[in-house]
Image (cartoon, helix red, strand yellow):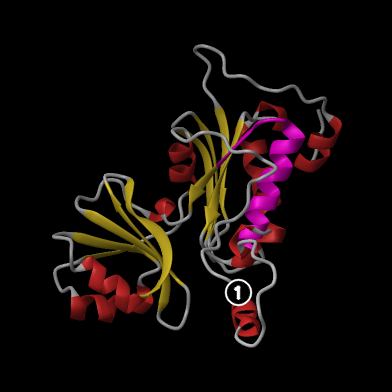
């Protein structure tokens, strides 16, 4: 059979809803475009089948589907083999999150399969680390998206915060490890928390896929990015205008 692009295959093949059968491993597509890195993985349950992480800053809207194409072909799979999409839902880059969520929803609709969302911050955590793990993503101007995790579980909700506030909260824990986009904050961490461990880390689609196994599928229609804050342009506009639409901005795509 000739190589057919993923999208063409999706539109041509007659899709049947896949249900997990006893003794059959679930085929999962997981991906993250919430930062400058692009990470895509294929899994059978927790087992990694194929993975690609690209750290060169490129337009994820251009790179994501070709990367999925390539991995599916290398694994010898067909789009109709997929049974679940697991995607990093945010926080992170506004554009990157829109790309990821739109792609995930389109594939889930086209293939009639489950969709699961995972925190982009949780995808930065190293589950082997003891104590409290603090994943951060640089939100500019000494602000970050941050979470506090212990034993793989969130102990403080993910949020947008000044890094000064993060350091103050981190002081309340006995042992902390900062992971993720830490490069611009190393000096502040060492000055405020000299005993803290600092481990730069990239998003891992493999970890996202594994985390998704323990989470329930979402309503595809209602699935939206978790931005955690408004874009700067809207914040500036609201300084001089009354907000008439009370719908939560971060729930709009």
Judged left or right of residue 107, residue 206 is left
Q: Position of residue 140 (x, y in %)?
A: 47, 79
Residue at position x 37%, y 78% from top? 184
Badge 1 crowding class, 10 Å Cα cut-off, few under 14, some 14 to 19, many 20 or more, is few
**Is 104 part of what is drawn in magenta?**
yes
The residue at the far bottom in this view is 240
Q: Position of residue 232 (x, y in %)?
A: 59, 79
Considering the image in quadrants, where does the N terminus appear? top right
Residue at the spot x=63%, y=47% of the render?
Answer: 223
- If the image is split into quadrants, where does the C terminus sit? bottom right
Labels in figure, total: 1
Which residue is labeled 1 in the image? 231
Q: Secondary structure at mark 1?
A: loop
Query: Within the magenta stretch, is there residue 110?
Result: yes
Q: Position of residue 148 (x, y in %)?
A: 31, 57
In this picture, residue 243 sits left or right of residue 42:
right
Secondary structure predominantly adopted by residues drawn in magenta? helix
Q: Which residue is at the far right? A: 12
User: Vertical placement of 87 versus 49: above or below?
Assistant: below
Q: Nearer the viewer, residue 197 or 215?
A: 215
Give the quarter of the image for residue 114: top right
Seen at 42% across and 63% down, the residue is 159
User: Which segment did they paint magenta?
Assistant: 96-116
Q: Residue 160: percent from the left, percent from the top?
A: 44, 68
Left or right of 11: which side holds 140? left
Above or below for 1 versus 204: above
Q: Nearer the viewer, residue 238 or 63?
A: 238
């Amino acid at each position: 059979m000739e190589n057919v692009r993923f999208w063409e295959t999706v539109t041509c093949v007659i899709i049947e809803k896949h249900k997990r059968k006893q003794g059959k491993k679930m085929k999962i597509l997981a991906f993250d475009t919430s930062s400058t890195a692009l990470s895509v993985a294929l899994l059978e349950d927790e087992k990694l089948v194929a993975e690609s992480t690209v750290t060169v800053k490129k337009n994820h809207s251009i790179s994501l589907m070709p990367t999925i194409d390539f991995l599916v072909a290398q694994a010898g799979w067909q789009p109709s083999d997929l049974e679940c999409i697991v995607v990093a839902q945010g926080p992170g880059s506004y554009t990157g999150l829109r790309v990821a969520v739109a792609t995930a929803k389109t594939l889930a609709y086209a293939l009639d399969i489950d969709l699961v969302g995972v925190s982009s911050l949780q995808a930065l955590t190293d589950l082997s680390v003891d104590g409290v793990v603090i994943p951060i993503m640089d939100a500019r101007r000494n602000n970050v998206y941050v979470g506090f995790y212990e034993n793989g579980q969130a102990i403080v909700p993910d949020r947008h915060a000044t890094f000064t506030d993060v350091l103050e909260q981190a002081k309340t824990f006995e042992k902390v490890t900062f992971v993720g986009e830490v490069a611009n904050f190393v000096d502040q961490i060492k000055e405020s928390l000299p005993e803290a461990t600092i481990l730069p880390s990239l998003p891992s689609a493999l970890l996202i896929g594994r985390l998704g196994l323990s989470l329930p599928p979402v309503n595809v229609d209602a699935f939206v990015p978790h931005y955690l804050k408004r874009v700067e342009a809207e914040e500036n506009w609201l300084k001089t205008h009354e907000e008439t639409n009370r719908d939560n901005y971060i729930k709009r795509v």
